Amino acid sequence: MNSQAIKDKFKDIFQTEPLMLRSPGRINLIGEHTDYNDGFVFPAAIDKEVHFALAKNSIDKFRFYAFDLNESFEMNINELSKSNTSWANYLLGVVAQYQKVGLVIDAGIDCVFGGNIPMGAGLSSSAAIENGFAYAINVLFNFSVDKLQMVKMAQKAEHEYAGVMCGIMDQFASMYGQENNALKLDCRTLDYIYANVNMKDYGIVLCDSNVKHELASSEYNARRKECQQGVAIMKKHDSKITALRDISIEMLEEHKSEFDSVVFKRCAYVVKENKRVEEAFAALQKNNNEKFGELMYQSHEGLRDEYEVSCSELDVLFSLARKSSSVIGARMMGGGFGGCTINLVKREQMESFAEHIAKDYCEITGKETDIHFVQIANGTGLL
Ligand code: GLA
């Protein structure tokens, strides 16, 4: 992405030289809806990103400009609260987190931001914005907050100012991303390992269903509750169990009769998905791309049939990819109910795959798909 336009706009509005930084969106290879169950995920930052131009001001105001929406926002720094402008809340929510830990923002901030992460496509544009602003404040105010604390602040901003009780995956991947590498993250301990996923013969292709995930936040919070209900049942048998991470499929099967059938399906999905992340990671170490892809297919089937967070358009994209001889793995990605599928596609066939899937998707659903070829990129940082 070219950040010159963001910088020029900033100078145009605020007449001063800004600090420039970038913050990426993320993909997730496998491990969906496992992060808030203390489980494993395997995401990576991508070359779709938000760019920021920022400076402190001496008039005690937050003055924000969303470049892509051509909208401005203003608030006095001593009147910090949630606003009716939803995009501004991602930034204000981060300020609130700094205040909460006692790091005082004692000057106004001017900010212009914009980028090329499609909104509502499951690529974590909101996490990219939260991380970018958290990083910027840390630099502008000379605080010594480390990356992990910024990730946690960004996640809390999403909880408290955007109202989505997300796990930690999106913010973590956006902040810790590393070129060519995905990171296998243990969402309980927050230990992580980078794994090179620059598959020589396969590229990553995202197909956006162009269905905006409106149901996502209510259903997301409902899934979290169902998982907690499952944990409560299992805890009666072993008090050490605190999350679905602690449960094997055998343990779950043994107590099946105590479960409501829906809650059982949800828990079975999470338990199996956690195992798939471990298996996928191991397959990658052995360059077994076919196995990796097969696990992606299984992940989609679980999300569709057991966790029930897919939608008919995502299922169409999945089925078309699965039938294609140029694809070795595909699945829906992110919270669900819309957004993108992620596909591992033979490099020399990426263009023809894109062409065919776009045509077929439109014929079946009457909708357009936006196709993105993505590269794995570095995490949030200065430009
Ligand atoms: C959203 C949330 C993440 C994660 C995914 C599902 O992207 O923000 O924390 O739970 O859904 O894997």
Image (cartoon, grey):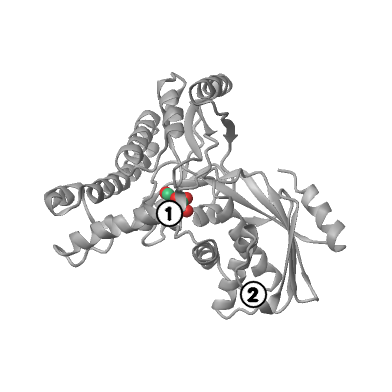
At 80% from the left and 48% from the top, the residue drawn is 5
Image quadrant containing the C terminus = bottom right
At 59% from the left and 33% from the top, the residue drawn is 372
**In-image side of 29 versus 203 (left or right):** left
Going by the numbered disc 2, the residue's amino acid type is: Leu
Image spot of residue 336 (x, y percent): 44, 44
**In-image side of 301 versus 10 (left or right):** left
Neighbours of disc 2 within 10 Å: few (<14), some (14-19), many (20+): some
User: SS of the residue at dot 1?
Assistant: helix
The residue nearer to you, when weighing 339 against 195, is 339
**Disc marking residue 80:** 2
**Disc marking residue 218:** 1
Whole-angstrom CA distance, mark 1 to mark 2, is: 26 Å
Q: Considering only vertical position in the picture, is 99 above or below 324?
A: below
The answer to whether any part of residue 186 appears in the image is no
Neighbours of disc 1 within 10 Å: few (<14), some (14-19), many (20+): few
The residue nearer to you, when weighing 145 against 25, is 25
Indicate which disc, 1 or 2, sits on the residue closer to the N terminus.
2
**Disc marking residue 165:** none
**In-image side of 155 versus 268 (left or right):** right
Image quadrant containing the N terminus = top right
Going by the numbered disc 1, the residue's amino acid type is: Ser
Q: Considering only vertical position in the picture, is 61 above or below 293?
A: below
User: SS of the residue at dot 2?
Assistant: loop
Image spot of residue 32 (x, y percent): 39, 46
Image spot of residue 371 (x, y percent): 58, 31
The answer to whether any part of residue 290 appears in the image is yes
Q: Nearer the viewer, mark 1 or mark 2?
A: 1
The residue nearer to you, when weighing 277 against 96, is 96
